[in-house]
Image (cartoon, helix red, strand yellow):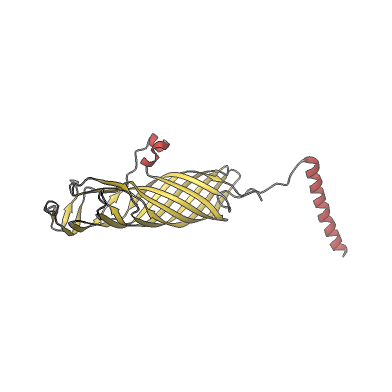
Amino acid sequence: MMSSFVFGQKEKDTLSVEKNLETFTGATPKKQKPDPLSKKGQMFVFFGWNRAAFSNSDINFSGNGYNFQLNNVSAHDRPTKFGIVYFDPTWFTVVQYNFRAGYFIKDNLALVLGIDHMKYVMDQNQTVNFKGHISDPTYAGMVQNGQVNLADEKFLTFEHTDGLNYENLGLERYQSLINKKNIDLVWSYGAGIGVMFPKSNVRLFGNERSDRFHVAGMGTDVRTSLNLVFWNHWMARLEGKFGYINMWDIKTTLNNKPDKARQDFVFGQVLAGIGYTFNTKKYN
């Protein structure tokens, strides 16, 4: 009983001293700040730029008087030459850009809304295998020995340059690697799924170019990133992504005819940029 009494007395005395110290000096006990980019209720926004690579794909075209497939078509991205366009907000859609808005639904687990504005350009200087039929003798005659040469652009030009827009929702888990006073390094990994909303630039058989936004299909991805956070708010982000895109309704004409193309391929993307975190959770 004496031991319990002494322990209780010490605890009471300690609380009394802390209370008196706060009363007479105005000091408050030190409060712990939540780790940036890792606590429930926090948010972040991010803007950056990307480079992308695409696998070869088979592209099927169908419409009035034709139904054919071009096999193993290669393509590349189209980065804008570095300059003021990368920093002028009135021209931001010209470059290959990325946007992210994240909200931590649990400690270390964030729901992330993203827009990946990639650019996909079919390599023009290539000869590809052809399978199917074309009723127009002019363009049917361009097929030689089961192949068609695309170099002169008369048969086809095919791009998603305004762009290959992957609008996605992802779930990302975050893990702190370094936690210092004014700098934090946080690693994340996760996956996403979303719709493809390209503005495809297609000119087939010399027709007027189709150039309009349209929901063309879906995509999915896995991703990982390193996030360097300065002074608990400013963020530099480096992200890698690997995914799959399937577009089964690519518009190839300007009217409401059933003309369309479809293709699927895998892609890889590396992006970097800057962001800002909002520590909305109160101090502990």
- At x 12% / y 51%, what residue is drawn? 138
The residue positioned farthest toward the front in the image shown: 256
| Residue 278 image point, x, y percent | 56, 45
Exactly how many numbered labels are in the figure? 0
Q: Quadrant of the N terminus?
A: bottom right
Q: Residue at x 78, y 44 (%)?
A: 22
Judged from this view, the residue extending furthest toward the bottom is 1
Residue 161 in the image, given as x and y percentages of width and height: 32, 46
Q: Is residue 64 left or right of residue 90?
A: left
- Pinpoint residue 70: horizontal percent, then vertical percent: 22, 56
Query: Along the line of sight, which residue is nearer the eye, 38 or 217?
Result: 217
Asked if residue 214 lies left or right of residue 151, the reply is right
Q: Residue at x 40, y 38 (%)?
A: 86
Q: Quadrant of residue 277?
A: top right
- Horizontally, residue 86 falls left or right of residue 9, namely left
Residue at the extreme top of the image, as rendered: 84
